[in-house]
Amino acid sequence: MKRIPRWMRIAGKASVSLAVLGFLARNLSGAELVAIVRSLDATLLVVGLAQMLLIPVLGGVRWKLILKALNERQSLGSLISIFWGGMALNQVLPTAVGGDVVRVWLAIRRGVAVANAVTSVLLDRVLMLIALVAMAALAGLAGEYGTIPAWQLMLCGIVLAGIVAGFASLPLILRLLKLLPQRRIIAVLVAVAEGILRVMRDRRAPLLVILCLATNLNLSLSAWWLARAMDLAVSFTGVLLAVTLGFVSAIAPISVGGWGVREAATVAVLTALDVPNDRALLFSITFGLAVTAASLPGIAWLWRGARLVPRASPPGARADSPVDRTESLQPVGPIDA
């Protein structure tokens, strides 16, 4: 089967984003938009934006904990900078994982083993997704579940069930991978599976989970400040539910950076909480733009260039000689599957 050209996939995603946003804004008039913008509370808007600056800091701390469990040593400052740059790229690239790929690449350039770099970024993503679903459940327990559309409930259930099944079957998957011919890709998959098991068994795992929940709570609190700036009559749990389900829905790789899909989910929740459709849409767009604005320092960091440190050459090797990096695929130390 012939592969769809990259430009066509990007154009398709852009079309979905524009079509959904256009449909949601079909009844929004220019005069109403100007009136809403003029009524914004600038102070609360700045507070919400400032709180978003904690996102890369918390992300860097999470990443450092994961790398420590994998016996990798990196400075917190460098990890925050790389995370910030990846966060920025995730906001502007057509795919939602472009920034993650750059994070892996930069981590490898700074001396992190290939498998550990992949494992750390992948596991951080998965744990944050679990935290998102958990936060939605917590909001539901607080009395907002009646507002969740059936399709979002189904999506959350599928995502959570898939993650739980994946973690539960990881030891079995690892055993099966070791039975296969050990080509390079298999070696990477084995190392990644071993790395995930090591992190989940590490004594810092509970702290990592708490940080994931705190990160999503911080994001929801930032959104709540924006909701207050727009004078939306909605509770904190309502904002939390709208934001978390919006991000979960944006996982679907059918739009640019989740734009449009995220707005549709957020508007669906907020309108069920009696927020007017137009205000709900503007809240979601403002929130997305605020996250993008908070990411701009990351783009500046990437533009200036990271201070990349190549992996040290093995003893006796010439500085200009190629280094065999096969051994870097394997995390340090044995692990029982």
Image (cartoon, rainbow, N blue to C red):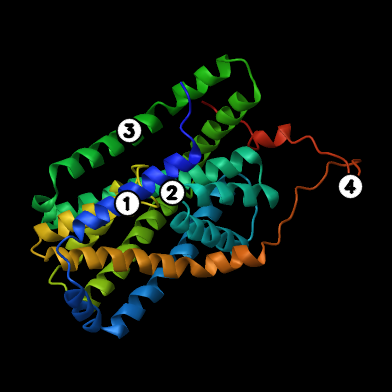
Mark 2 lies on a secondary structure that is loop
Q: Any mark on residue 17, and which?
A: 1
Q: Tell me the crowding category of disc 1: few under 14, some 14 to 19, or many 20 or more residues within 10 angstroms, Cα based.
A: many
* Residue at image coords 59%, 32%: 191
Cα separation, mark 2 vs mark 3, equals 19 Å
Q: Tell me the crowding category of disc 3: few under 14, some 14 to 19, or many 20 or more residues within 10 angstroms, Cα based.
A: few
The reply to whether discs 4 and 3 touch (Cβ–Cβ < 8 Å) is: no
Q: Tell me the crowding category of disc 4: few under 14, some 14 to 19, or many 20 or more residues within 10 angstroms, Cα based.
A: few
- Tell which tag, 2 or 4, sits nearer the viewer: 2
Q: Tell me the crowding category of disc 2: few under 14, some 14 to 19, or many 20 or more residues within 10 angstroms, Cα based.
A: many
Of mark 3 and mark 1, the one earlier in the sequence is 1
Residue 170 seen anywhere in this rendered image of the structure: yes
Which residue is under mark 4?
A: 319
Which residue is under mark 2?
A: 96
Front residue of 81/62: it is 81
Cα separation, mark 2 vs mark 4, equals 37 Å
Left or right: where 184 falls relative to 7:
right
* Residue at image coords 43%, 40%: 9
Q: Amino acid at mark 4?
A: Ala
Cα separation, mark 2 vs mark 1, equals 13 Å
The reply to whether discs 3 and 1 touch (Cβ–Cβ < 8 Å) is: no
Residue 164's x, y, as percent? 33, 34
Residue 136's x, y, as percent? 23, 52
Q: Any mark on residue 162, and which?
A: 3
